[in-house]
């Protein structure tokens, strides 16, 4: 009888904070790697233990700078060349996902390019969380485990025990996500309609639906400069909302984000640890997705269904 390939979990340099949590939840030690950087900025990754015949899971979010993506590609290539049995890229945050289509002439489809690069490097499977657009799964010709933060957000929302709850989409693109939560929680839904003058700059915004006397929860896949969510929250407070909370899977929080959040009418911003974050604002609550990834890694390794992990 053939032996089952051993499982090994490794981490990129910038995602070690969450990789350690995932490995601990799974019950194994994080694998040993070495990162060497040359004086000109070039770098090299290596495994400091054998991966021959192993089921290798590499945990690395590909947030800026692009070095994080390049490091993941090198780690995949190194594992394949070291005769790993299977190589799975565990990407809590899938960078370049906002570039999922040509929204104007002469631009790249960055998400598809990243998919091509990962495939060319030799990855066997992708595991990620709340993609900016679901169709990015179709950019791959290999299995993609697309997980959702709803498995930790929904229990948290229920524990808030809010009366007159309303789910809000921050823009038209987020209506599918908000509608799924609205149906599951059996609450009404409102939509924020916005126009952008350019990236990260919100133009006009209006609220479609009634928020007066309601406790509003805004749902989004990511929060970057916080311009959209804070503008929506302040508008809802002006229209009579009792409170406004925001839930976003990926806390990019760049530029003036922290200042905007602190100065806004948002009661609480709930995010995950898919990205490294310092919750320097009292309004920010960080929930860990380590146990979610550890559970799915276990099920994938043991060829079990992961459908029970999808709440919404």
Image (cartoon, grey):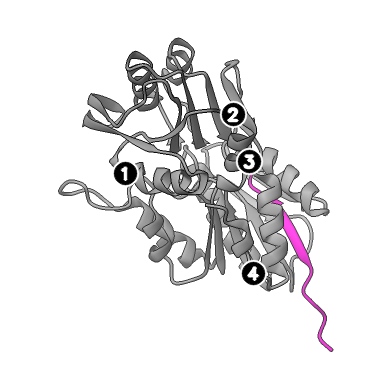
Q: Residues within 10 Å of mark 2 (few under 14, many from 20)?
A: some
Where disc 4 sits, the SS reads loop
What residue sits 39% from the left and 26% below the top? 229
Please name the residue that numbered disc 2 is placed on: 277
Q: Position of residue 78 (x, y in %)?
A: 62, 62
Query: Which mark, residue 305?
Result: 4
What residue sits 60% from the left and 15% below the top? 282
From mark 3 to mark 2, how far is it between C-alphas? 22 Å
Q: Position of residue 239 (x, y in %)?
A: 32, 17
Q: Do labels 2 and 1 touch, CB within 8 Å?
A: no
Q: Which one is nearer the viewer's eye here, 33 or 114?
A: 114
Where disc 1 sits, the SS reads helix
Q: Residues within 10 Å of mark 1 (few under 14, many from 20)?
A: some
Q: Earlier in the sequence, mark 4 or mark 1?
A: 1
Q: Position of residue 142 (x, y in %)?
A: 49, 71
Is 135 situated left or right of 276 in this image?
A: left
* Residue 120 in sight in this render: yes
Q: Earlier in the sequence, mark 3 or mark 2?
A: 3
Q: Is residue 239 above or below residue 63?
A: above
From mark 4 to mark 2, how far is it between C-alphas? 31 Å
Q: Which residues are magenta?
A: 1-14
Q: Which one is nearer the viewer's eye here, 50 or 300?
A: 300
Q: Give yes or no for residue 76 being in the magenta stretch.
A: no
């Amino acid at each position: 009888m053939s032996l089952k390939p051993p499982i090994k979990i490794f981490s990129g340099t910038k995602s070690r904070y969450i990789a350690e949590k995932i490995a601990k939840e799974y019950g194994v030690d994080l694998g040993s790697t070495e990162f060497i950087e040359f004086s000109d900025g070039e770098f090299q990754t290596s495994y400091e233990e054998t991966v021959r015949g192993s089921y290798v899971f590499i945990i690395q979010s590909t947030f800026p700078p692009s070095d994080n993506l390049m490091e993941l590609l090198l780690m995949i290539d190194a594992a394949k060349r070291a005769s790993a049995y299977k190589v799975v890229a565990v990407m809590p945050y899938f960078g370049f996902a906002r570039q999922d289509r040509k929204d104007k002439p002469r631009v790249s489809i960055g998400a598809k390019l990243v998919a091509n690069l990962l495939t060319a490097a030799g990855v066997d499977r992708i595991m990620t969380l709340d993609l900016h657009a679901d169709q990015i799964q179709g950019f791959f010709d290999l299995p993609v485990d697309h997980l959702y933060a709803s498995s930790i957000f929904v229990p948290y929302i229920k524990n808030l025990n809010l009366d007159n709850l309303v789910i809000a989409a921050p823009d038209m693109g987020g209506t599918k996500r908000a509608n799924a939560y609205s149906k599951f929680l059996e609450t009404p839904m409102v939509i924020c309609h916005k126009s952008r003058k350019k990236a990260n700059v919100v133009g006009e915004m209006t609220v479609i639906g009634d928020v007066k006397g309601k406790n509003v929860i805004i749902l989004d896949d990511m929060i970057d400069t916080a311009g959209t969510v804070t503008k929506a929250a302040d508008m809802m407070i002006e229209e009579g909302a009792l409170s406004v909370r925001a839930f976003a899977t990926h806390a990019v929080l760049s530029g003036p984000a922290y200042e905007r959040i602190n100065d806004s009418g948002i009661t609480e911003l709930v995010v995950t640890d898919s990205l490294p974050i310092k919750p320097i604002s009292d309004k920010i609550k960080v929930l860990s997705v380590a146990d979610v990834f550890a559970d799915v890694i276990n099920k994938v390794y043991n060829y079990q269904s992961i459908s029970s992990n999808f709440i919404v």
